[in-house]
Amino acid sequence: MTDEDRRPLLVVENLKQYFPIPGGNVVKAVDDISFDIMPGETFGLVGESGSGKSTTGRAVIRLDDLTAGRITFDGDDISQKLTTEIEQRLRTNMAMVFQDPMASLNPYRKVVDTIATGLDAHFPRMDREERKEKVYEMMDRVGLSRSQANRFPSQFSGGQRQRVGLARALIMRPKLVIADEAISALDVSIQAQVVNLMKDIQDEMGTAYLFIAHDLSMVRYISNRIAVMHLGHIVEAGLTDEIFANPVHPYTKSLISAIPRFNPETERDRKPLVYDAKELGISYDEGRIHHLSDSHYVLATDEELVSWN
Amino acid sequence: MAEKECILRMRDMAISFKTANGLVKAVRGTDLNVFKGETVAIVGESGSGKSVTVKQIMGIRSANEVVESGSIEFTYIDDGGAKRTVDIMKLSERELTSLKGNHIAMVFQDPLTSLDPTMNIGRQLSESIVAHLHLEGEALHARCVELLDLVGITDPEARLRSYPHQLSGGMRQRVVIAIALSCNPDLLICDEPTTALDVTIQARILQLIIDLQRRMGISVIFITHNLGVVAKVADYVNVMYAGKVIEAGTIDDVFFDPRHPYTWGLLSSMPSVSVDRSERLYTIHGNPPNMLNDIVGDAFAPRNPYALDMDFEQEPPRFVVNEHHWAATWLLDPRAPKVEMPSQLKGRIALMKTEGGGESDR
Amino acid sequence: MEKTVSEEGFRLCTKAHDEVAEKEYADYSYAKEIAGRFLANKGAAISLIIIATIVVMAIVAPMISPYAYDDVQTQYNNLPPRIPGLEQIGIFDGTSDGVDLYAQKGASDQYHFFGTDSLGRDIWTRVWSGTRISLTIALWAVVIDVFIGVAYGLISGYFGGKVDIVLQRITEVLSSIPQLVIVTLMLVVMKPGLQNIIVALIITGWIDMSRIVRAQVLRLKSQEFVLAARTLGVSAWNIIFREILPNTLAQIIVTFMFSIPNAIFLEAFLAFVGLGVPAPLASLGSMINDGYKSAMTYPYMVVAPVVVLAILMLGFNLFADGLRDAVDPDAQ
């Protein structure tokens, strides 16, 4: 696989997202992170609440302005105020699927119109028949029946609504889809359906995914590479297999340890690892990126790295 | 297990909801047994009716709820030391209130809404103790501190004066558990108590519940949709689908020898860290049924790749697998063709059996 | 209930069972749900009847009445109410203190259901044409206010930032001056007339609506479906009209219904203080103004418009209440 000639689809450099709160303080939701995503790959961004993973997703798709740092998407610098051209390219080549199946669809719009949102925004004069066909095509692809096109969101189940959200995101054939906890609110068996669907679509359309989640086991299943976030920092990142086979950062270890296993014999007495940054004396600001291999890196001070190995 | 005392016996529970669009038959005939000192898990996805079923034990009902049938026999030792059995469905408000807190307690999913934001922790903890155990002053304070300590909250004296919003999610849930256990109930009901918490906190709260259960010998009913959680906490498992329990057995029965295709599907669709990443996740096709409609035959039939013609016509009765394991599927009828669980699941189970003890913790 | 089970039933089902899933989740009607809740509320159902009755009367009664609202017949003035049928039982028989005033004034062939006023005009006709005027004024004022308020709230809420700050300061200033003061001053300057009254009511009536709409917009702005539209490059105006506005309609309609009795009352009050519609036009308020001076001697002159006004306002308030509860039952 000649990856060298392929330039990354998305490059995030030293991203910072600080939000002022009343009282004069700032919340450092994202505090200097860097990563990139290659075309067609799935990059998993994992973390618990307060890790900054969702904020990162919103920054990448420019729902928010950046406090600091640079984001390059498909060759365009999208960090500053967007020109009309760049915005046009951004909005047609990057899309997002949201978490809440209830809130991510307009309850007063038919599903066919919701899915065509992108088409209407960029091709307002598209012929009605053509528009309908494109929507139908998308519905087929995500496993929705065409007969449901004129229904309203309240007439669909949670899993089906997420499929609508996926269809809406994919209709413009974006190069990158950000899935912001897109399956977290679904039942487990439905999660599996949607994840398989996303994988299939990736095989067909070559879409890259930024898969933001807190469920490591599902992330492991779908991602090529994973980055683990905690309190606004990426503490460890690498190929999925590397992270699971050889986690270095204690937080990564505790996260992996917290995944419930399905073997009752072993699970009953297994005590998950506890991570306490204060106890371990870890301060993220002091650490720097250490590359353990081409793809695997950790945020640590030199001493910490030694002690963890 | 047969010698153990059965403290709760629910029979034939059927609950419907009146909505503007018709009658939603949320629970369609559920039985439940809880034995002393055991953890019974109820597993199911949305629409399975697990929450509604269990809320009946606490007498929690919505305005548009209709009880079609059902009895809940609860056995306990009353204040005088005598053993009593009552049907919870037939109790008056007052009788039920004296039972709650004292003998049955519940922990809900969202600690934020379970606690009163305007009262500090100490007051909320005391309320229940005062009502049921009639302690006051020094004794009350000591008991409160003892309880916070029991649930693993550091610096309990200070925490008594804190308000809910000053605590993290995990700590709040610990407080909720403390309140639930404050009067030494016989039965603790947990409705997805860790779902709203972060993954690392989840693991610790689960461990807490297990430790407390072993220490205090209480029985626990645990509702969840996560089989990994079930594997950790449960002695006995009930799998619910579309308002009915479709398979029930000990934890080993259900995990190592599942018989119902829905259970197969559920076990298969959860990605496991020990399974090869490149293998495609097995999924259950389709969506759970709309409970507004009448269900003919097996509710799972439309989504069941192993469905028999029979499944669409008549509801399968319970077929006994062994003395503590049964499944309601026509596949267990002697006349049915021999169908085995999906090979992927078979492989997983084989792997689990070899894992046994000594799994290295990463 | 043991059905004998045949051997064939135990074959693996080969038919595609996807179609069964289709029927699920259909047939859910949001409108039916709201209508159901609304009609289940007794107060709301009654209000529907009240409003319908009054509106029908306001339209039809003056048309079929033998008298016009401005028929001045001073020889027949101050006649008490006389209703055929009821007069046999001894009430509303046109007598006062035992004296048959109709006979006295030579009007034995006339029936005035609500009596006549000091100029001999039929009060029944005037009450219903007055209701027409009151309703017309109220509806015009409220409808225009809705447009202004909704537009104001949408813009202020969605665009935020400096736009919002400026627009909100304006509303704050305007709302700090009592509405009655503004309206009264305006009419003193502009001189009362049907159009001027409507304009005066419009001036401040939109503020509540704009606040409610703005609050809704602020809440909706951060909803995921709006974010989705933004990420797909939908223009701000399209987001406002296609995504946000439909989700505020329920609140807009409820506020609209509540504004009507407000406007009716405001107009009645203006009329009562002498700034109402000019004679010979009548509105409920102006009739109360005319009638109250002789309330002691001829109570029927003021009772009729007061009762109709009260019932009208009660009806609209109950309707709006019922609508709000039907649309948002949790807010109870």
Image: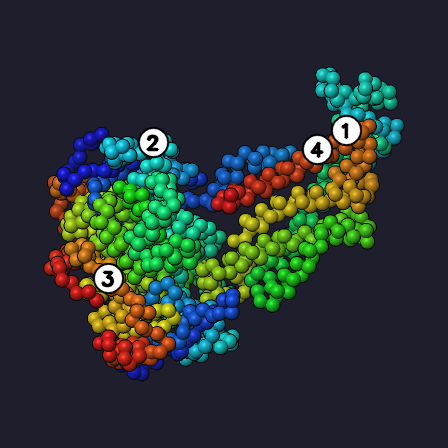
The answer to the question of whether label 4 and label 1 lie on touching residues, with beta carbons closer than 8 A, is no
The answer to the question of whether label 2 and label 3 lie on touching residues, with beta carbons closer than 8 A, is no
- Amino acid type at circle 3 is Pro
Q: Secondary structure at mark 2?
A: loop
Q: Are marks 2 and 3 on the same chain?
A: no
The image's mark for residue C300 is 1
- Amino acid type at circle 1 is Tyr
Label 2 sits on residue: B91
Cα separation between marks 1 and 2: 60 Å
Cα separation between marks 4 and 3: 75 Å
**Foreground: disc 4 or disc 3:** 3
Q: Are marks 1 and 3 on the same chain?
A: no
- Amino acid type at circle 4 is Val
Horizontal placement of C36 versus A298: left or right?
right
The answer to the question of whether label 4 and label 2 lie on touching residues, with beta carbons closer than 8 A, is no
Pinpoint residue C158: horizontal percent, then vertical percent.
Answer: 56, 62
Label 4 sits on residue: C307
Q: Earlier in the sequence, mark 4 or mark 1?
A: 1
Label 3 sits on residue: A272
Pinpoint residue C308: horizontal percent, then vertical percent.
Answer: 70, 34
**Foreground: disc 1 or disc 3:** 3
Q: Which residue appears at 63% of the width and 61% of the height?
A: C168
Single out the residue that lies furthest toward the front: B138
Screen quadrant of the C terminus of chain A = bottom left
**Foreground: disc 1 or disc 2:** 2
Horizontal placement of B299 versus A50: left or right?
left
How busy is the neighbourhood of tag 4: few (under 14 within 10 Å), some, or many (20 plus)? few
